[in-house]
């Protein structure tokens, strides 16, 4: 026989524990590159032009392969 909990945990206890597990809304900002008006996730490279903070960090071949 494995060790078993003596009492059933209350709904409050379960709800309080799971209060931190909610999902957050994904926020977007506009790409800073002039001429590129796609929405990007903050602190990520743009998926359209592959640039981050004005530098090209993802080359065109990599963006076309879809990785
Ligand atoms: Zn862009």
Image (tube, rainbow, N blue to C red):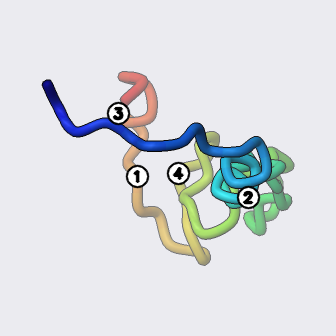
Answer with left or right where residue 40 lies relative to residue 49. right
Please give the residue where the numbered disc 4 appears in the rendered image: 50
7 vs 30, nearest the viewer: 7
Mark 3 and mark 1 in contact? Answer it, CB < 8 Å. Answer: no
User: Disc 2 or 3, which lies upstream in sequence?
Assistant: 2
User: Disc 4 or 1, which lies upstream in sequence?
Assistant: 4
Q: Specify the quadrant that holds the C terminus.
A: top left
User: Disc 4 or 3, which lies upstream in sequence?
Assistant: 4
Please give the residue where the numbered disc 1 appears in the rendered image: 58
The 10 Å Cα crowd at callout 1, few under 14, some 14 to 19, many 20 or more, is some
* Real-space Cα separation, disc 2 to disc 1, in angstroms: 43 Å
Please give the residue where the numbered disc 2 appears in the rendered image: 16
Answer with left or right where residue 62 lies relative to residue 46. left
Furthest residue in direction bottom, as rendered = 53
Please give the residue where the numbered disc 3 appears in the rendered image: 61
* Real-space Cα separation, disc 2 to disc 3, in angstroms: 48 Å
Secondary structure under badge 2?
helix
Residue at 40% across, 52% down: 58
Mark 4 and mark 1 in contact? Answer it, CB < 8 Å. Answer: yes
User: Disc 2 or 1, which lies upstream in sequence?
Assistant: 2
Secondary structure under badge 4?
loop
């Amino acid at each position: 026989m494995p060790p078993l909990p003596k009492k059933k945990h209350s709904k409050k206890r379960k709800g309080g524990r799971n209060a931190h597990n909610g999902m957050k809304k994904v926020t977007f900002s506009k790409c800073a590159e002039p001429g590129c008006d796609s929405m990007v996730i903050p602190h990520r490279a743009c998926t359209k032009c592959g640039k981050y903070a004005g530098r090209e960090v993802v080359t065109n071949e990599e963006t076309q392969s879809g990785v």
